[in-house]
Each structure stands twice: as C-alpha cells, then as structure tokens.
Image (tube, coloured by chain):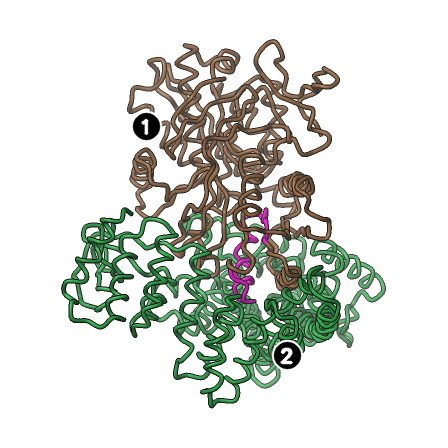
Chain colours: A green, B brown
C-alpha cells in the first residue's frame, strides 16, 4: 500500500472521530490500515497499532482476527464479521457491531492470517489481557508473555507483580519473569532465573535450558545450573511420561473393549462368527453423522441423541441379518463366516452409494476436545478419557442386563442348554434374534465413540474387525470379564512396546504373543467351565 | 481380508466389464481408458479422478472431439485390488483398443500395470505425486516427483521457518519410505545431524497416535525449532491431526507439512485442529487465476454440487489430458509411438497461471506451492517457487540413482541411463 493511500484511508476514518481521544484515534487508524493491508507485514503493523492503542475494543477485534473470522468488504474496505444467511452472508461492522444487511459470498473476502501472524497476535492479545479481571485469564496471559522472549515486557511484569493480590497469579508472574530472564545478558539474573524455573516442566522452558546447557558463550556456573535444573525437570517428566503411557494403553484398550464387547456377545455367547461386526460399528458412526447434520445447532448435545439412535439402527440391522441369513446357518460356522463376510461387503458398498466413498465430517463437540491438566506438564486428552468411561459404562450395563433381567436369564439359559431351554418354554429363536440384536447394538454404540476418534468412511469397520476377534479369543470365548481384561491388557502392552519398537513392530509382537498364547491356552484367559464348554 | 479379493472382486469387476463393453460399439470414435478404483479402499480418492476425466472428455467432445472424431470414455473398476489393475489394463488395451489410459493412484498399482503397458506398447497418464526412481517409455508422470514437492517443502521449512530438528513420519509403504530416504539424504547433505532426525513409520489406517505424538512432543522440546514432514497416507491423517490438537500442539509450536493432505481429504473432516498446518502441492483450489476459476465452475456444474472441491491430482489429469490431445493433433494419429514422440516438448497452460511442459524424461514442469490450512478446508499460499520446476525422475540425493538420467528422445531413448558407465539398463532401477 502506498503512503498517500494510507493517509487518505486514515483521514477518511479520522473525520467522524475528530473529537475522539488519542487511544481511539490510534485504534481507528489501525483498523483502517488493517482493512486495506495487502501483505502480512502490513497486517502485523496494523495489528500492532490496534494493540498499542489500548482501546477497550482492541482485544475483541484482534481475537476475531486470530480466529480468522474477520472479513473486509470488497467495495468499501470495511472490516466486518459474517454469519451465514440464505443468500451469502449477513454482515455486521466489526468495530461498532452495526448491522450492514446481507451481501453475496464474493462481496467480502477474509482477512487471512498465517502462523507467524497468529503467534504475534496471540502475544498481543496476551499483552492486552494482562489486567483482565478473571485471575485464570490473567495467569494464562502472563505465561504467554513469559514465552514471548520479549525482554521489554519485564518492566510491565514487575509493575504487575507489585499490584497483584491473587497468590496464584503472583506465582505465574514470578515464573514469567524468570522465564524471560533466561534470555537475560546479566549472568546473575540468569542464574537466579534457572533456580526458579526448576519447577516448570513446560516445553518452552525445557528448550531454553537445553540451549543454555550447551551454550558456549555462557559461563561455567550457568551451564552447570542449567544442566542440574534440566535433569531435575527430566526426572519429573519421566514419571509423568510413565503415567501418560499407562493412560494411553488403557485408552487404546478401552477402544478395543468397546469394539469387541458386542462381538463377545454374538461370537462368545451365540457362537456366530459375524464378519459384518465392523460394518455395524460403521453404521453407528454414520448415524452420528446423520444426527449431526439433522441438528447442526446443537452439536454438543447431538452425541446423546446419536447414542440411542445408533444402538437402535445397528440392532435392527443386526436382527435383520440374524433373521435373514444367520438363522439358516446355525451349526455351520464356515458358511456363516462367508455369508456374514458377504453382508459386510454389501453394507460397505451401500454406504458408499448413499453417502459417497468420501469420508464424512463428524464434528467433535467442544466438551470433548482438548485436554485437562492434572498437574502442570501432565495432561490427559478429554476425548480419550470420556471414551474410557463410556466403554466401562457399556460394559457395566451389559453385565447388568445379563445378570438381572429376564432377557439376560433366557439368554444364558439358551447358551447353556438350548434343548432344555426350549423344553422350559423359552422361545429360543426370539432369544437368538434379540441376542444378536444386542451385540449389534453395542457395535453401533462403539461406532459413535469411534466417530470421535477416526474417519467416518465406508472402511471404518475393516480396521477394527481383526482386533475385535483377537480380543475376544485372547480373553476367552464367552467370557465378558475376559474381554475386558484382555482388551485393556492388549492396549497397555502395545503402548508399552510402541515407543521402543515402533507402531508396526508393536503390532507384530502382539500378534506373535497371541499365537504363542493360544497354543498354550487355547481357551483364552478366562476359559468357560462346565459340560457345555467341554463338548 | 484375502477372501475379499479372491471371491467377490472378480465378480464385481466382470459385471462392470460387461457394462462397459455394452456401450463401447460406436464407429469412428477414439476410445480413452479410465482406470480408477470405484470401489474398495482407494475409491475415496480415485472416484473424483474418474469424474474429472469424464468432464474433460465431454468438454473436448463439445469442442468437436479430436481428429474429427468423437472421444469415448471406457470406464473400468479395478476395485483397489492391485493385480486386478493389471488385468483391467490389459482388457482396456487388448479388448477395448483404447488410444491411451488415464489412471492409477497408488505406486503399487502403477508398478502392477507397468509391464502390461510396456508389453502392449500403450500409453498411461499417471496423475499422482510419487516417489520417483522410475521412467517408463509408456508412462507419463503428470504428478510431482520428489524434487517438485518434498524437497521444496523442506527448503521452505529450513530457510523461512528456521527448522533445525526434523520428524519424518510416514505410513509404512513404498512412497513414504523412498521419499524419506531421499529427504534424509538431503537433510544430511545440508548438515543436519543424525540426532536431529526422527523417523517413524506406522501401519496403514493407524488410528492410535497418542504415544507417537507424545514422542514428537518430547523430541520437539530440545531447544531447536522442530517440524514434522508427513507422508502419512490419507485415512490415518484425521486421527493424527486430532491427537495433535488434543495434546495441545499447535502449528506455531510444531508445524506439520503434509504431502498427501489436499482439499478433497479436508472436505471430509473437522478442520479445527488442522488450521495453520502446511501442505505442499503444485495446485491449490484457492489460487486466484482465471483458468482456475473457469475449471472450478465447470467442475461444480458437471458434478452438480456447488460445494465439491478441486485438488492437485485433478489438475494433473487436466494437464495430462490437454497434453495428450495436443500431441494427438500434432501427430495426426493416436498411434502410441507417434504420440510418444510428439508429446515431448508439448506445452499447455496449467491451472495456476503458468505453463506445463512435457520433459524428455516423461515428467512435467510444475510450480511448487506451500499452503497453510484454513478453517474452511482451503489453503492459503504462504510460499511458492519463482517459476516452474522440471520433474526429476532419478533423485540426485540417493547414492544409487545420482548418476542415472532418463531421456526418451533419440539418440539416448532410455529411461535408466547411467552416465558413468554409459549403459542403459532395464527401466526399473530397484
């Protein structure tokens, strides 16, 4: 942008604001520059003017820019925010929030940001939030400043420290000052800073210390202190990593359990080898997608609608498979295997025809994204945590159904002695259909969980079918507890092997171990006892 | 899943073959074969390319066809089954007598059809970025060779972002392995130490990235700017990026540059965790150019869906088809030998405002773009090469292939010529 253009733009903006304060003037000058910025350097300069003005609306505007939600109008060069409207966008002025009516999609263009600008914006916003009324926001902003490597901020931080009342925020300020001081040229300040950051396991501090430890320009004492602080930090990190690895294993295990538990009903209890089990999970995942497209304004709640819906749909398809195909093939395992394999291909291609072969986008609700920090440096991802809980819940519910309901009783009776059960007046074919439906429904529930972790596409089921059979066989066919234990232990085992051997080898080792194990104990971890199992 | 390929696929394929034969008898048409999977795992990517070809052919027919004849598309479905690719290719050439074939996606499918095309002397246009180390007389590589995608991306990270530590993460098959071998050699030639390179391979469709991301996080906290160069294959990407986001690694901390993530892949996922990560391609849908605008509007009209996106392999087919059409016009015949001679040196406009030229090594010239992923699933170009880069079939960074060149023009007429020994060996180096 040429200089006269800037001046003209600034003037155009300044006229109505002639009586405004200096902060406001600066702010609007920045806004005008941002609206007409052509390069990232221009945008950065404009954002700096806006941030520097200290005007109350600056933070909100920069946050909008950071989120990529700021647009300029093509004709007037005005900054606007947009919302979807019937034809194109409904736009509002980004500064005054004045309603500007609606425009076509090509009449506005987005103010783009790149990684570098994003980083700069983040520290600018942090700078503006340093005096935010919420202590948590304040702390976050302060830590952000600590990582900015901008030594000029030290004075501001010292000033904040003298006026801060909240203890937690005071700690955060002290840590931020120490972190900044790691770059200080004053050896004494640096040495003091190293002692303070010992308690900080953040990646930024660790990289700074690593750099200091091998920095030839630093003096001996500094280097030694950095090395000692680093090893103290690393010892703590090692403990955290162990905890984290255990969680990773349990989480992988919980997914295996979720995928296998339905199979443990159909395969373990009924003895039907259902190769279409994976596709029933896929149906559950697609149900989640459909539910989300039906209720686009309530993504957060959509999963709670999707769960019963997925259970029902998968269960109905399961019952149809049982009544239509499996029923005629009892006691012919090989034919069942082939027939259900055919069903799995039919289901895959059906989905491909209806939804296209492309993956569908299932949105992760906000309450499922991100992670919670147990202690600084040890964070656990939320989606995994919820899925772990969910799979335990499904497991418990299934146990309750089997043990305490009439249907569960009939199911166990049919499993143990079909002829006797029939003689006692149990409609065994109805029980068969419902049992198969239950297993299929649970697969549907697993699909809802998987939609939050992986692709929702026609091939989703194939990835899990082998693992599911593995878990059921390892745990002992027919034993629910076996499925739980084997799923969790296989998960933990493969996560323990993975860092050392790599993901490919981990898979191979687990399979080799299973082969050897099945040779020694063909009935798995928890073998079925009794006459029926022996025969 | 072996039963799958043994029993079901040939059946499905036979039905398809019958369908295409049924429509194939028109006098005086030029047949163009389309060899893309419409079912199975690769259908996700390849179906779009089939549609692109149908659009291009319809478009050419609207302009009066070629050599006064109409073009006729012959579509077959190799069902993501590599041996079936070879069978279907043979059927296209021998039974359908097509003039040229546009198809394949994975390297293994290309390797599978290669002997068929060489034996029957027909033409294949291959539209996907690949690992290089190949130049066949009968294949035209309109996708990127490693020096047109991977090397420039690494250069960008090294020079513009200041990356010092490298994670090379890939799916465990031929393309990532070869690309990473080239990249590793390249990085070492630039003075990167062994300790600063971490190489990781995962199985196809890997979905549990927790511990690998944790490893990358640890690797990245060693005081040097770290980046991930990802050759992770399509389906495994979504869980990979989701886990990155969940473990709180943003593109500003550790950027990921991907070679297999394009607009089409992004349209099927929640893009929130990906914003700011990078991809290197030779085409982006977002590039502001009038030919690109025209192509996009023609595509959305053809596919009857205003939201469908365009991507890099589609552009490769666009260029490949235009080049073939021009070479046929120039040669005045569809005879493969004549077209092969005529097509070298043919230049056509690409979709990003430049010119693509067919080189004597059967690769083309392409510009290289680095884009940052935006939350609408599009890319914002942050870097591009000054001009176009000619594709190099044999990498200069691998000890075995350094001395090898490919030139299909006389007097050399060889795809694997060793400049040191002066010998022309078989066409496949490995």
Q: Please say if B249 is above or below B160.
A: below
Q: Magenta stretch: give its range.
A: B227-250
Q: Position of residue A109 (x, y in %)?
A: 28, 52
Q: Please say if A420 is above or below A67.
A: below
Q: Quadrant of residue A401?
A: bottom right
- Residue extending furthest toward the left: A16
Q: Position of residue A128 (x, y in %)?
A: 39, 73
**Which residue: 64% across, 79% down?**
A196
Q: Please say if B118 is above or below A268.
A: above
Checking the image for residue B59, the label placed there is: 1
Q: CA distance from mark 2 to mark 1?
A: 70 Å
Camera-nearest residue between B327 and B348: B348
Q: Is residue B338 on the magenta stretch? A: no
Q: Position of residue B218 (x, y in %)?
A: 66, 63
Please give left or right for residue A219 compared with residue A275 in the image: right
SS class, disc 1: helix
Residue A275 in view in this figure: yes
Asked if the residue at tag 1 contacts the one at tag 2, i.e. Cβ–Cβ closer than 8 Å, the answer is: no
Quadrant where the C terminus of chain A sits is bottom right
Please give left or right for residue B410 compared with residue B422 in the image: left
- Residue extending furthest toward the right: A520
Q: Nearer the viewer, mark 2 or mark 1?
A: 2
Q: Please say if A339 is above or below B146.
A: below
SS class, disc 2: helix
Camera-nearest residue between A182 and B160: A182
For mark 2, what is the residue? Answer: A196
């Amino acid at each position: 942008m040429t200089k006269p253009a800037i001046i003209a733009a600034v003037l155009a903006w300044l006229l109505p604001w002639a009586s405004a304060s200096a902060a406001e003037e600066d702010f609007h000058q920045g806004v005008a520059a941002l609206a007409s910025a052509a390069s990232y350097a221009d945008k950065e300069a404009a954002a700096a003017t806006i941030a520097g003005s200290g005007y109350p609306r600056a933070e909100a505007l920069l946050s909008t820019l950071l989120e990529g939600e700021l647009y300029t109008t093509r004709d007037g060069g005005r900054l606007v925010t947009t919302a979807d409207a019937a034809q194109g966008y409904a736009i509002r002025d980004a500064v005054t929030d004045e309603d500007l009516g609606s425009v076509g999609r090509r009449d506005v263009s987005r103010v783009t940001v790149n990684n570098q600008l994003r980083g700069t914006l983040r520290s600018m916003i942090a700078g503006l939030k340093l005096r935010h009324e919420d202590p948590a926001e304040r702390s976050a902003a302060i830590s952000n400043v600590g990582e900015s490597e901008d030594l000029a901020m030290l004075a501001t931080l010292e000033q904040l420290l003298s006026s801060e009342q909240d203890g937690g925020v005071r700690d955060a300020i002290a840590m931020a000052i120490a972190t900044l001081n790691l770059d200080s040229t004053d050896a004494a300040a640096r040495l003091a800073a190293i002692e303070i950051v010992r308690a900080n396991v953040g990646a930024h501090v660790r990289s700074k210390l690593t750099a200091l430890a091998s920095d030839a320009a630093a003096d001996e004492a500094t280097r030694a202190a950095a090395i000692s602080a680093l090893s103290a930090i690393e010892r703590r990190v090692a403990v955290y990593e162990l905890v984290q690895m255990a969680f990773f294993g349990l989480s992988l295990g919980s997914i295996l359990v979720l995928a296998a538990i339905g199979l443990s009903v159909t395969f373990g209890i009924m003895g039907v080898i259902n190769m279409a089990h994976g596709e029933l999970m896929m149906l559950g995942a697609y149900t989640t997608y459909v539910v989300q497209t039906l209720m686009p304004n309530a993504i957060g709640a959509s999963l709670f609608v999707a769960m019963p819906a997925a259970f029902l749909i998968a269960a109905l398809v399961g019952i149809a498979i049982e009544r239509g195909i499996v029923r005629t093939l009892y006691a012919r395992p090989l034919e069942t295997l082939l027939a259900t394999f055919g069903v799995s291909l039919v289901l895959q291609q059906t989905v491909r025809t209806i939804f296209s072969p492309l993956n569908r986008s299932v949105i992760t609700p906000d309450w499922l994204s991100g992670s919670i920090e147990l202690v600084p440096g040890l964070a656990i991802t939320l989606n995994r945590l919820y899925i772990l809980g969910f799979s335990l819940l499904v497991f418990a519910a299934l146990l309750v159904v089997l043990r305490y309901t009439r249907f569960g009783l009939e199911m166990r009776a049919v499993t143990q002695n079909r002829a006797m059960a029939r003689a006692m007046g149990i409609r065994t074919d109805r029980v068969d259909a419902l049992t198969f439906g239950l297993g299929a429904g649970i697969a549907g529930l697993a699909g809802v969980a998987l939609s939050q972790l992986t692709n929702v596409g026609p091939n989703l089921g194939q990835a899990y079918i082998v693992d599911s059979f593995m878990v059921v066989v390892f745990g002992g066919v027919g034993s629910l507890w076996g499925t739980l234990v084997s799923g969790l232990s296989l998960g933990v085992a493969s996560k323990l092997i993975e860092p050392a051997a790599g993901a490919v080898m981990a898979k191979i080792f687990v399979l080799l171990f299973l082969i050897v194990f099945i040779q020694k104990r063909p009935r798995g971890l928890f073998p079925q006892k009794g006459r029926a199992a022996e025969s | 899943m072996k039963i799958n390929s043994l029993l079901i696929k040939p059946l499905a394929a036979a039905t398809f073959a019958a369908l295409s034969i049924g429509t194939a008898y028109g006098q005086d048409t030029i047949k163009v074969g389309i060899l893309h999977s419409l079912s199975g795992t690769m259908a996700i990517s390849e179906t779009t390319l089939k549609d692109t070809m149908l659009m291009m052919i319809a478009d050419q027919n609207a302009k009066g066809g070629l050599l006064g004849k109409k073009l006729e598309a012959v579509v077959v479905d190799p069902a993501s089954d590599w041996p079936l690719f070879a069978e279907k290719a043979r059927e296209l050439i021998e039974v359908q007598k097509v003039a040229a074939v546009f198809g394949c996606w994975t390297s293994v499918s290309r390797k599978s059809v290669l002997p068929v095309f060489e034996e029957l002397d027909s033409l294949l246009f291959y539209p996907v970025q690949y690992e290089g180390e190949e130049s066949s007389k009968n294949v035209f590589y309109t996708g990127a060779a490693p020096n047109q995608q991977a090397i420039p991306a690494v250069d960008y990270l090294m020079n513009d972002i200041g990356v010092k530590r490298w994670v090379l993460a890939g799916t465990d098959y031929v393309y990532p392995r070869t690309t990473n071998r080239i990249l590793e050699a390249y990085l070492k030639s630039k003075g990167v130490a062994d300790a600063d390179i971490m190489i990781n391979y995962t199985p196809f469709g890997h979905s549990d990235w927790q511990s690998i991301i944790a490893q990358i996080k640890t690797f990245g906290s060693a005081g040097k700017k770290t980046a991930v160069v990802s050759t992770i294959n399509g389906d495994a990407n979504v869980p990979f990026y989701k886990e990155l986001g969940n473990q709180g690694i943003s593109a500003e901390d550790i950027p990921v540059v991907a070679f297999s993530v394009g607009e089409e892949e992004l349209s099927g996922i929640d893009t929130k965790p990906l914003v700011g990560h990078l991809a290197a391609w030779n085409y982006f849908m977002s590039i502001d150019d009038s030919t690109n605008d025209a192509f996009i509007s023609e595509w959305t009209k053809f596919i009857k869906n205003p939201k469908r996106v365009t991507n890099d392999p589609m552009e490769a087919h666009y260029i490949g088809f235009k080049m073939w059409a021009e070479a046929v016009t120039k040669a005045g015949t569809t005879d493969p030998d004549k077209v092969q001679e005529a097509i070298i040196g043919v230049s056509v406009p690409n979709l990003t405002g430049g010119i693509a030229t067919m080189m004597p090594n059967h690769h083309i010239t392409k510009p290289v773009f680095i884009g940052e992923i935006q939350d609408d699933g599009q890319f914002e170009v942050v870097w591009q090469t000054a001009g176009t880069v000619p594709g190099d079939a044999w990498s200069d960074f691998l000890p075995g292939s350094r001395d090898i060149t490919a030139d299909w023009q006389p007097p050399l007429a060889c795809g694997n010529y060793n400049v040191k020994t002066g010998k022309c060996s078989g066409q496949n180096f490995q």
